[in-house]
Image (tube, rainbow, N blue to C red):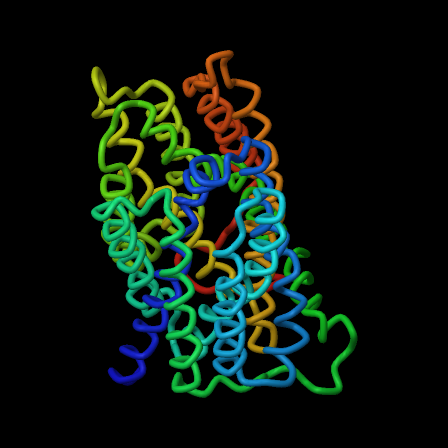
Amino acid sequence: MKATVRIQLMLMMFLQFVIWGSWYGQMSKYMVTQLGATGIQVGNAYAAFSIAMIIAPFFIGLVADRFFAAQKVLGVLNLVGALVLYFLIQTKDPDAFFWMILLYCITYAPTLALGNSIAMQQMVSSEKEFPAIRVMGTVAWIVVTNFIGLYGFGDKVTIFQISMVMSLVLGIYAFFLPDTPPKANKNASVAAILGLDAFRLLKDRSFLIFVVSSILICIPLSFYYAWANPSLTDSGMTNVENKMSLGQASEIIFMLLIPFIYARFGVKWMLISALLAWIVRFVGFGYGDANTSEWLLYLAIILHGVCYDFFFVTGQIYTDNRAGEKVKSAAQGLIYLATYGIGMGIGSWVSGIVADTYTLADGSKDWTSIWLVPAGISFVVLILFLLFFRDKKSGSAAVPGQ
């Protein structure tokens, strides 16, 4: 890959995750503080992202894989998203907010798979080249959350204003990215048009177990995104957004280690180590306290690198290796559907119910009981994975059906 192309892709990834990171982790605090939302209303807002993720693969199959270059689709979606965010900023009712965030997420969700596809189609070896590109998304998350935390914007409408401006910037910049033309046959079947051909990958047992595990582990992940910020705030921790960015800092370290660990240990043991880390971090969130055991909270935050990189980034590489050339975009869409679509959709709904269930009479929350729920779910996923995942390939790319 040429150095100029690498720089272009790194900037694309940076902008894409500034857009997401500016509001996603802070939305619960904004909704509770500014809109007076309940736990269920917060859960519904996060579920909007998941609904959009379910729609995204079909959109990609219809448009990006078939008719238009991926970078042009990325540009249009971001420009439309900036317009939607302008109207979302004016919304003050939590129920109306749901419909606005849903409309916005429908424009943003497909861009995640599109960004991966644009990057990976410029690569010879995704497991070696992708982490160095993808790490810029983590850098972006650190930069924007620290900026928000430093100026106290976590519960302000500013989080969406930043996203709006950056969406406009990426919308324009996308048209200057390397050309990534559609690869699907224009005379393809309906299944191919809708991106359903990627579902054939599920015939491979290893990939099927990976997808099922991905769906289930995203239920606990939704607890983290929705409730970590309010939980840490209630524990007495100060400058929460800044300290949570330590999780993204650890992402950089572990993401850059992926090529070496992937080659040495293979996908199975990387995924297992991620699942173990999920269990430990939720126990840390449940029993940590800023006054007596703040180290547990820091441990839970820093483990984000292992949890996210070794499961989700490794999973994206694993998916790319399993997919054929004609369905690479659809395959990335499939894994996003499974994780941020189905898994986090269920998780957002469950997390809202659990948060309200453990809300005490005085309005405070029993955070220990809340965090033990995702810890228990993570343990179940680990057992499932240990019992049924039998991938014989370790670090090398595998062909679907082998």
> Looking at the image, which residue is at 59% across and 85% down?
68
Figure check: 24 above or below 31: below
**In front here: 76 or 394?**
76
Residue 298 seen anywhere in this rendered image of the structure:
yes
In the foreground, 141 or 181: 141
The percent position of residue 100, horizontal first and vertical second, equals 59, 55
Where is residue 192 drawn, in percent x and y?
Answer: 71, 74
Locate residue 42 relative to residue 279 in the image: left or right.
Answer: right
Q: Quadrant of the N terminus?
A: bottom left
Image coordinates of residue 278 in percent, x first then y, are 40, 34
Q: Quadrant of residue 196?
A: bottom right
- In this view of the protein, which residue sits in the foreground, 400 or 64? 64
- Residue 242 image-quadrant placement: top left
Is 234 drawn above or below residue 83 in the view shown? above
Relative to 135, 182 lies left or right: right
Res 206 visible? no
Quarter of the figure with residue 287: top left
- Which residue does the image show at 24% across and 22% down from the upper left? 290
Residue 294: percent from left, percent from top: 22, 24
59, above or below 258, in the image: below
Q: Residue at x 56, y 71 (%)?
A: 329
Q: Quadrant of the C terminus?
A: bottom right
